[in-house]
Image (spheres, rainbow, N blue to C red):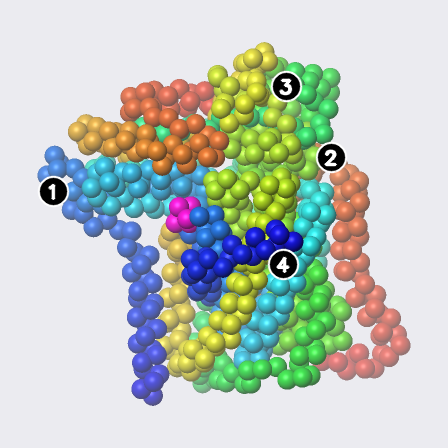
Amino acid sequence: MSRFRTATIGLTAAAAAAVLLTGCVDRAGADTAPDAFPTGDITFYTPTQAGGATDLTARTLATALESELGVSVIVDNRPGGAGSVGMEHVAGQAADGHTIAVLPVEVAMLGHLDYDTDPADYDFLAQVNSQPGTIAVPADSPYETLGDLVAAAEAAPGTITISNAGAGSIWEAGALELGSAAGVEFQGVPFDGGAPAVTAAVGGQVDAVVAGIGETAPAHEDGRLRVLAVFTEEPAPALDGVPTATEQGFDVVIGSWAVVAAPVGLDAAVRSTLEDALQVAAESAAYIEFIESSGNIPLFLGAEETTAFVSAEHERFGTLLAGR
Amino acid sequence: MSDVIAGVGALLDPTVLLCLIIGTLLGTLVGAVPGITATMAVALATGFTLTLEPIQGLAVLLSIYVAAQFGDRVPAILVNTPGTPASIATTFDGFPLAKAGRAGVALTSSALVSAVGSLASILILVFLAQPIARIALSFGPIELFALVVFGMTMMVGVSNGRIAKGLAAGAVGLLLGAVGRDPITGDHRFTFGLPELTSGLPFIAVIIGVFGLAEIFNQIIEARRGGTASPIEQLGRWWPDRAERRTLVKPTAIGTGIGAVVGVVPAAGGDIAGIIAWDQARRASQHPERFGKGSLEGLAAPDSASTATMGGSVTTTLALGVPGDSVMAVMLGSMIVWGLQPGPSLFVENPDLVFSISGIMIVATLAALGLALVRMQGVVKLLKLPLNALAVVIITFCMVGTYAVQNSVFDVIVMLVFGIVGLGMKRWGFPAGPLVLGLILGPLAESNLRRGLLIDGPFAAFQSPIAASLIALSVFALIAPAVLRTLKRRSKPRADAAAPR
């Protein structure tokens, strides 16, 4: 019987340890003087699964933030509901600067898609990258330029299929924006994420795909896809020699991005401490290398500019998504 | 040949071997904890491995991937809870075997056939990567829809004779699968204003609830009524005897073949392969009536199939740059950051890498097999615990594992609710398998069918030869047994009438 007992105690201890481990993300710090920020660990939320682009952005920034602020910065993933679960969770936390989050472009979109997400719930601290949109066709496609593709859609409205990362995703919005700029109707085909949407174009099941540059540039390089246009103002460094849509006569500038935000109501001093630390983190070599390796554009915009940018995007998506 | 030497030679670095061992241990562990899937473990490890050398990082990630497929069989067989979705079909015969006092043979056989499936599929990767990967690209939405429909036909098989109740459970599963956002329009369906439900019911929480928690609840009730105190009183022999080994051969061959093909198909993984293989092995078996009641054949087919998907998934990922399953989708991201762009050019620019990857997977398979065989001594102690202690531990692990999936209390509540639903189903004789199949396969079938309709119009499924033949196979699979039964009944009406159900 004593052996059973040892085993029981051991297993109970293991179970208890497992409970403690999952609970250890709780912040240890205490709120004392407001001028002595930060007073404890910082929880850095991402509204996405571990391992994705947004999560790795948070983790890379967190390392630099730790050395800058001198406290632990713990990344906490709260995925679900296209990001709305995590965003709403962050909006409900105390605005003491110990809760921050990486928020993807969905923060400006979900409110127009029947979710309760609202950019007004956050104080934006910085924009840390942008992920240009691209449109690509299969390697053996007859369409050589964006003009060819638009002409085909003009000839037979609604028959040219364009895959995207999902209903209500930024890349569905990108295809809608192209359609309205060119005055033609495309048939959007939403997939469950960017990778399967690109796969459908590589396999020739759809005529074209709108996706982030990080997903289409590698396939363009080894000849599985042909990127017809980049949706940026300047040609993108990751796709040398590919023209922008604007250069081809279609005024489409759209892309995904990531900002860092806190629950609304942050103290001004706390806000500037975080903003300064984020500038150092976003300009660190490790972060720039990570963003560039996936084909995206590292950048840093301060709190004021980011707030204006997000509200402009929020307004723009309102009109664009109303036309779905 | 020099590529082989260079590729395998890269593994002789002691740090690479250390990475392999760490990955194998981690993979076995996370596989055995219900809720924590291989995808999650690889995703979490990615944060640490990005700073390593590519080969070291790949050694960690690939060995987690391989070893999780061994670890997840243990809770599936012993407590009826799949450690990861890849072992859903393991529970169909694994748990009945354990209840019949043959857990030892079940665990050993499962580990052996899993290793066979894994090794066979890696050989395919080495020799046939490029030609086979071309098949993958011909699987568009409508072909995937047809494959999923084929997978659904096994709802009948898994119902174990209780066909009406099985189909009812399957229909409820399909309805539950409709919860969430519409895959094409994005409209919210049956979400009741809960943001958590917009991405659908968390199916891992549902699986843990209806399989694991319901089983524990049921045992508690049985024990209070003076039934058997412990679920599994003895483990029996460890090694399958000669006759048992012989019965393993055919289902393992079927499983490995099905797994290799399903693995190549993008986005289809071990769970679907295991389910299809179980049903196909049942049809090919001389004792189909034992399936679902503790058949070694019914254990060998899904276990070899789900490990055999690994070689195919890696093949598709490396040769096409298209993720073969959800783990590979995560790994693809890491490879791009390391500057190893998967795709046709990989075989030209880094031919040795293919051999390094196969080498890592072979070593990881053997290490995981060794670990699985050694570890079983500890498992014995676990099962000799009295039920009151064991139930608490298992319920705790179910809750922790469910919470860890997305750090969500909502998921834990869903698991508890489905634990009670599962208990009700068990008491009233509704099989849980079809419910889970409906929940997992329903959304896949719906979204892919609707994409196919958008792309190719209303006759999409009949214009594609692959889709048309898969649908014909599904119809055949449903009709053939009924026709055969009628024929048999005509020839010997008495025997059939006397057969108990």
Direction from residue A27 to residue B277 in the image, left or right: right
Q: Disc 3 marks which residue? A: A146
| A49 shown above or below A104 | below
The chain under label 2 reads B
The image's mark for residue A82 is: none
Q: Disc 2 marks which residue? A: B456
Mark 1 surroundings: few (<14), some (14-19) or many (≥20) residues within 10 A: few
Which residue is located at x 42 percent, y 46 percent? B50
* Image quarter hosting the N terminus of chain A: bottom left
Q: Disc 1 marks which residue? A: A32
Q: Disc 4 marks which residue? A: B122
Are both tags, 2 and 4, on one chain? yes
Tell me where residue B100 appears, x and y as whole percent: 57, 82
Q: Are marks 2 and 4 in contact (CB under 8 Å)?
A: no
Are both tags, 1 and 2, on one chain? no
Determine the CA span between mark 4 and mark 3.
Answer: 42 Å
Amino acid type for the residue under numbered disc 3: Leu
